[in-house]
Image (cartoon, grey):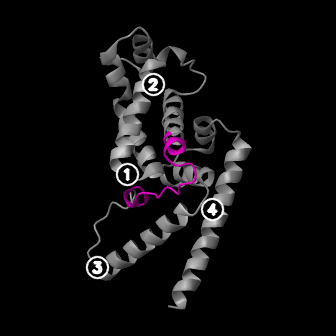
């Protein structure tokens, strides 16, 4: 019989490394995907997600269970990403990874024209997301690409629910405008 999450957390707090491995196993991929969506580079994303998981283990005793474990963990991942960005280049525009945008596209497309259209569309979306502010980009990635609820995003980013909704709304409006502008530019080519 396997241990439930609360039992695993208790064992982790007591220093049980095996319990920690079991606990975080289901969160590793999403942690990596969040980091990859923010920093794009797979190696950097792996380093960031590993660093975040080390922080989770180190600060496990500080987890007060006011939020879910996953929300607490993803907040640490986001903060580790933001620390990385600040340390490496404050004003750098961080591109988003195409695989994250296409993560829900699971069917195999056999029409070459449709494949090309999809690649062009993905590139346009990626370029548009890259033009958003880092705050809006983070909100859009967490909501529209990773599928977190507004409440989860508020907890992950340590923001109010209203702030999160506002950032997502503004991000979507800005994306729409950027994509419209991009289409106008293409029609002149």
Q: Nearer the viewer, residue 69 or 93?
A: 93
**Residue 115 point in image, percent of width and height:** 32, 75
Pair 3/4: label in front: 4
Q: Is residue 177 above or below residue 164?
A: below
- Quadrant where the N terminus is found in the figure: top left
CA separation, marks 2 and 4? 32 Å
Label 4 belongs to which residue? 172
How dense is the environment of label 4, judged by Cα within 10 Å: few (below 14), some, or many (20 and up)? some
Q: Of label 3 and label 1, which has the lower sequence position?
A: 1
x%, y% of residue 27?
40, 34
Name the residue at 36% across, 20% down. Answer: 20
Disc 2 marks which residue? 56
The disc, 1 or 4, on the residue closer to the chain's N-terminal end is: 1
What segment is highlighted magenta in the picture?
Answer: 84-101
How far apart are the two marked residues, 2 and 1, measured between alpha carbons? 22 Å
Q: Secondary structure at mark 2?
A: helix
Q: Is 117 on the left or on the right of 60, as rendered?
A: left
Task: Give the residue displayed 53% in from the left and 55% down from the top.
Answer: 92
Q: Which residue extends farthest left?
A: 110
Q: Which of the two discs, 1 and 4, sits closer to the camera?
A: 1
- Disc 1 secondary structure class: loop
Q: Which mark is residue 111?
A: 3
Judged by depth in the image, the label closer to the viewer, 2 or 1, is: 1
Indicate which label's residue lies in the foreground, 3 or 2: 2
Q: Earlier in the sequence, mark 3 or mark 2?
A: 2
Q: Residue at x 39, y 78 (%)?
A: 117
Q: Residue at x 54, y 16 (%)?
A: 62
Q: CA distance from mark 3 to mark 2?
A: 45 Å
Mark 2 or 4, nearer chain start: 2
Mark 1 surroundings: few (<14), some (14-19) or many (≥20) residues within 10 A: some
Q: Which residue is denoted by mark 1 in the rendering? A: 41
């Amino acid at each position: 019989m396997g241990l439930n999450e609360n039992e695993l957390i208790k064992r982790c707090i007591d220093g049980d490394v095996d319990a920690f491995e079991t606990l975080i196993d289901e969160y590793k991929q999403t942690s990596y995907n969040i980091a990859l969506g923010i920093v794009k580079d797979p190696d950097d994303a792996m380093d960031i997600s590993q660093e975040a998981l080390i922080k989770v283990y180190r600060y496990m005793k500080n987890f007060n269970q006011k939020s879910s474990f996953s929300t607490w963990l993803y907040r640490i991942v986001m903060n580790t990403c933001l620390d990385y960005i600040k340390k490496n280049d404050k004003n750098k525009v961080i591109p988003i990874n195409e695989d994250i945008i296409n993560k829900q596209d699971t069917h195999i497309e056999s029409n070459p024209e449709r494949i090309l259209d999809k690649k062009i569309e993905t590139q346009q979306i990626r370029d548009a997301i890259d033009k958003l502010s880092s705050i809006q980009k983070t909100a859009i990635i967490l909501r529209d690409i990773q599928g977190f609820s507004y409440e989860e995003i508020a907890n992950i980013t340590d923001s109010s629910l209203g702030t999160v909704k506002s950032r997502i709304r503004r991000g979507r409006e800005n994306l729409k405008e950027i994509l419209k502008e991009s289409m106008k530019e293409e029609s002149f080519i």
